[in-house]
Image (cartoon, grey):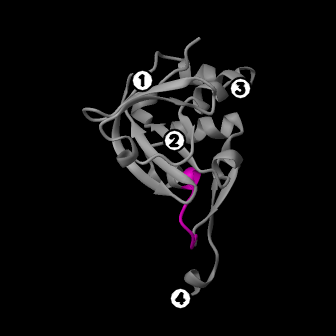
Amino acid sequence: MKLRSKLASLAIAGAMTVSATVTHAANIVETAVSAGQFNTLVAAVQAAGLVKTLSSPGPFTVFAPTDAAFAKLPAGTVETLLKPENKDQLIAVLTYHVIPGKVMSSDIAGKSLDAKTVQGQSLAINATMGVKVDTATVIQADIATDNGVIHVIDTVVLPKS
């Protein structure tokens, strides 16, 4: 079929192009885009200029808040963070959700620990009964990507001020 022989691409908010005929495993950003439940996170990553970083070889562990998690923030918080003048604060919030390296749930099962984030502060992780990350609960674990892993969380976690 002619359509199959052509390379189709999907423009994501003018900031990134993802080939529709990707033959490799998707990276963290591509996986988030295709999941459909991370639209706010993807917009924030784009506004912060972190698409290239989170598409790099990594590996990274990302605790990814869903759109519903962002919706739980006080009214106006997301809009304020997305303003260009708040880019540094947005980067701090987003990188607080990222740990260097690939940490699967089996690596931390039954443990309680602090993990240093890319932002510089530590996340409190408690995997003794389910998995809590600061105040968030992991609702889906171990979404493998070609440059790390995504764990879906139900709440946006914020760095300590």
Q: Which of the labelled discs sits on residue 31, or is there none?
A: none
Quarter location, residue 19? bottom right
Q: Position of residue 118 (x, y in %)?
A: 62, 33
In-image side of 78 versus 108 (left or right)? right
Q: Position of residue 69 (x, y in %)?
A: 41, 30
Tell me which segment is drawn in magenta.
Answer: 22-30
User: Main structural element of the magenta stretch: helix, strand or loop?
Assistant: loop
Residue identified by numbered label 2 = 62
Q: Nearer the viewer, mark 1 or mark 3?
A: 1
Amino acid carrying mark 3 in the image:
Lys
Label 4 element class: loop
> What is the crowding at mark 2: few (fewer than 14 residues within 10 Å), some, or many (at least 20)?
many
Q: Nearer the viewer, mark 4 or mark 3?
A: 3
Going from N to C along the chain, the mark reached first, 4 or 2, is 4
Residue 126 within the segment the image draws in magenta: no
Identify the residue at image location x=49%, y=26%: 123
Going from N to C along the chain, the mark reached first, 1 or 3, is 3
Residue identified by numbered label 4 = 1
Going from N to C along the chain, the mark reached first, 2 or 1, is 2
In-image side of 118 versus 135 (left or right)? right
Task: Work out which residue is located at the far top of the displayed protein and give it.
Answer: 161
How far apart are the alpha carbons under marks 2 and 3? 19 Å
Going from N to C along the chain, the mark reached first, 4 or 3, is 4
How far apart are the alpha carbons under marks 4 and 2? 38 Å
Label 1 element class: loop
Residue identified by numbered label 3 = 87
How far apart are the alpha carbons under marks 4 and 3? 45 Å
Q: Nearer the viewer, mark 2 or mark 3?
A: 2
